[in-house]
C-alpha cells in the first residue's frame, strides 16, 4: 500500500552582498520558497521555487498562493503528483515540486565541481577590472560580465582594459540581458570579433521579440550569440529550436519548468547548451549540478561548456547554501 506524505513550505528572502546591476534594473535581494515532502519512514524530499518574474515567470506571491492550495496531508506519491497539476504559467513551481518528489525517492548525490567548471560572475561596469583577480585565485577560468548598463563607448573601453588584464586562457562571456539596440549590438559584436576566441559568446544582445534580427547577427559575426531571455520556458526553447536557432542556449533550468522534460528534449535534439543559475540556495544548485552531470553522461559528444553558476560570492553567509538541507530548513523556521 502506498504511504502517505506530508507537505510543507517555507519562504526565504536573502539580500545580495552588493546590488546586481543589469539592463533590467538593479536587483537587491533574492526571494524564493523551500518545499519539503516527508513520508512515515522519515525520508524527506526538498525542492526549491526560485521565481524570476522579469524573465516571465510567476511572482513570489503567485508561487506562495499556489503552495497554499496544496494539502498538508497527501495520500501517496501519485496523489502528490496529481495534487499539483501545475500550469505552464508557473514554471518555477513546476521545477521545485518535481525536484522535491525526485529527492524523496532517490539518493541525493551532493556532487560539487571544481570552480574551473563554473563561470565567475563579475560586477557590472568598471568594478570588473579589479574583481576578476579574486575569482581567478579561486580557480575560475571563465568569467561573465553584464553589459548594457553604461554608454557603449565607455563599456568597450572597459572591455579593452579587462582583456589586457585577463591571463591568456581566460574566457569571457558578455551578457546584455536583451538590453542593446541593433546598432549597439553591431558595435559590440564587431569589437568582439576583433578579440578572437577569447570572447566565448555574447548573451541575448537584443530583446526576445527581435528574433529575426538575432538570426541576422548570428550569421554576420564570428562571435557566437546565446539566447537567454528568449527561452525562459521549455516551450520557448522548443519554438526557437524549430525556428532555426543554431547558436547557444543559456538554460536557466530552475525557471524553465520540468527538468525531466528538459532532459528528454536535450537528448532528442542536438543543442549547444549552458546550464545557468538564478541564484538558488544549495537545494536548487544541487539540482542544476545533477542535471548537468546527467546530460553530460547521456550526451558525451555534445559541447560541454562551463556552467553559468559561479554566483555564490554574491550571496550572504546565511545558512541557505548549507548542504545539510535539514539544517537549512530549520534555519528558515528560526
Image (cartoon, rainbow, N blue to C red):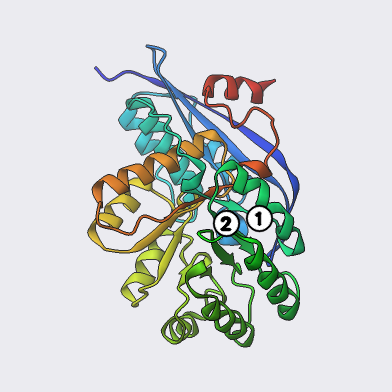
Give percent across and percent down for residue 300.
Answer: 25, 51
Compute the Cα span from label 2 to label 1: 7 Å
The N terminus - image quarter: top left
Task: Locate residue 115 relative to residue 162 in the image: left or right.
Answer: left
332, 6: nearer the viewer? 332
Q: Assign a secondary structure to mark 2.
A: strand
Give percent across and percent down for residue 120.
Answer: 58, 51
Look at the numbered discs 2 and 1 and tell me whether their residues touch, using CB distance below 8 Å.
Answer: yes
Chain-order first, disc 2 or disc 1: 1
Residue drawn 62% across and 67% down?
163
28, 301: nearer the viewer? 301
Give percent across and percent down for residue 247.
Answer: 39, 72
* Quarter of the figure with residue 301: bottom left
Mark 2 closeness class: few <14, some 14–19, many ≥20 residues within 10 Å: many
Q: Assign a secondary structure to mark 1.
A: loop
Give percent across and percent down for residue 266.
Answer: 30, 57
Q: Which residue is mark 2?
A: 143
Instruction: Reply above or below: 98 against 154.
Output: above
Instruction: Reply above or below: 54 against 258.
Output: below
21, 199: nearer the viewer? 199
Q: How many marks?
A: 2
Q: Which residue is mark 1?
A: 122
20, 121: nearer the viewer? 121
Give me the disc on residue 269: none
Residue drawn 31% across and 48% down?
295
Mark 1 closeness class: few <14, some 14–19, many ≥20 residues within 10 Å: many
Instruction: Reply above or below: 14 against 243.
Output: above
Amino acid at each position: 500500500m502506498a504511504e502517505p506524505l506530508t507537505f510543507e513550505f517555507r519562504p526565504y528572502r536573502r539580500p545580495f552582498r552588493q546590488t546586481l546591476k543589469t539592463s533590467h534594473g538593479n536587483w537587491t535581494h533574492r526571494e524564493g520558497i523551500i518545499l519539503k515532502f516527508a513520508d512515515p519512514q522519515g525520508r524527506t524530499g526538498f525542492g526549491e521555487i526560485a521565481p524570476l518574474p522579469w524573465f516571465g515567470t510567476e511572482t513570489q506571491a503567485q508561487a506562495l498562493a499556489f503552495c497554499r492550495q496544496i494539502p498538508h496531508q497527501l495520500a501517496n506519491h501519485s496523489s502528490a503528483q496529481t495534487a499539483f497539476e501545475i500550469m505552464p504559467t508557473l514554471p518555477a513551481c513546476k521545477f521545485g515540486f518535481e525536484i522535491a518528489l525526485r529527492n524523496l525517492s532517490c539518493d541525493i548525490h551532493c556532487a560539487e565541481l571544481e570552480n574551473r567548471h563554473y563561470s565567475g560572475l563579475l560586477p557590472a561596469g568598471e568594478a570588473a577590472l579589479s574583481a576578476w583577480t579574486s575569482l581567478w585565485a579561486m580557480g575560475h577560468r571563465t568569467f561573465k560580465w553584464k553589459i548594457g548598463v553604461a554608454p557603449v563607448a565607455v563599456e568597450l573601453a572597459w572591455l579593452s582594459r579587462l582583456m589586457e588584464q585577463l591571463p591568456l586562457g581566460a574566457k569571457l562571456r558578455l551578457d546584455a540581458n536583451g538590453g542593446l539596440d541593433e546598432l549597439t549590438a553591431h558595435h559590440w559584436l564587431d569589437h568582439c570579433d576583433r578579440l578572437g576566441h577569447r570572447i566565448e559568446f555574447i548573451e541575448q544582445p537584443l530583446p526576445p521579440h527581435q528574433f529575426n534580427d538575432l538570426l541576422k547577427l548570428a550569421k554576420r559575426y564570428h562571435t557566437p550569440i546565446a539566447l537567454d531571455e528568449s527561452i525562459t520556458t521549455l516551450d520557448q526553447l522548443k519554438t526557437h529550436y524549430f525556428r532555426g536557432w543554431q547558436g547557444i542556449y543559456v538554460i536557466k533550468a530552475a525557471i524553465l519548468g520540468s527538468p525531466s522534460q528538459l532532459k528528454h528534449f536535450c537528448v532528442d535534439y542536438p543543442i549547444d547548451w549552458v546550464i545557468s543559475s538564478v541564484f538558488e540556495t544549495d537545494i536548487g544548485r544541487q539540482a542544476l549540478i545533477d542535471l548537468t552531470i546527467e546530460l553530460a553522461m547521456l550526451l558525451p559528444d555534445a559541447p560541454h561548456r562551463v556552467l553559468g553558476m559561479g554566483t555564490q560570492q554574491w550571496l550572504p553567509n546565511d545558512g541557505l547554501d548549507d548542504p545539510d538541507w535539514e539544517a537549512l530548513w530549520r534555519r528558515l523556521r528560526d
